[in-house]
Amino acid sequence: MERLQESLQLYINLLMTKLIACCGLDCAVCDARTATLRNDDELRKATAAKWQTLYNVPEIPYQTINCTGCLSPGIKFAHCDECAIRNCVKAKGYETCGQCADLESCDLLAEVIRHVPEALANLRQLN
């Protein structure tokens, strides 16, 4: 029983300090979310430029950088509707990939983990 209480407290602490997306990314520190909450076009422009390079996308209009977080109510980044990871999680009835038995071997999640290894740690902590 004590172990269960400790696990529950760890989960609550994680949720209070981070906003974990379906894939394990922490929306609380995402520049798109920050730009949205602050209505900051300069940060939107910088984020668009950064993501174009990071994700090898030729053009991301800065005006599309609007998101309140993957699992939070409100506006989402344009890619969220077509995000294969998010759609997989929803189809399975999960909150995050952390609930899936294929977490460690998922091809969909592999690219996220390659760029942001902390995402896997976040998902593991949710279990």
Image (tube, rainbow, N blue to C red):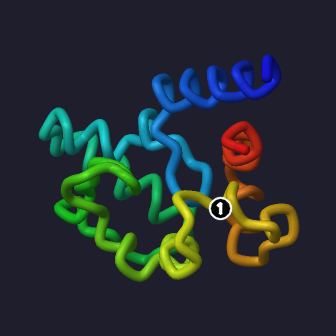
What is the quadrant of the N terminus in the image? top right
In the rendered image, the quadrant that contains the C terminus is top right
Residue 116 picture location, percent across and down: 68, 48
- Is residue 79 toward the left or the right of residue 8 in the image? left
The foreground one among 1 and 86 is 1
Residue behind mark 1: 97
Residue type of the residue flagged with mark 1: Cys
Kindly identify the residue that appears in the image at 26 percent across and 57 percent down: 65
* Residue lying farthest to the left in this orientation: 39
Q: Is residue 45 visible?
A: no
Say which of 48 and 9 sits in front: 9
Where residue 78 sits in the image (x, y, percent)?
29, 72
Residue 80 lies, with reference to residue 24, above or below; the image says below
Q: Position of residue 39 (x, y in %)?
A: 13, 40
Residue 28 horizontal/vertical position (percent) = 42, 35
Q: Is residue 6 left or right of residue 38?
A: right
Query: Can residue 66 be seen at all in this image of the molecule?
Result: yes
As drawn, 58 above or below 117: below
Q: Identify the residue at horizontal 53%, vertical 72% (top origin).
A: 93
Q: Residue at (68%, 59%) from the top-left corner?
A: 99
Q: Residue at x 58, y 77 (%)?
A: 92
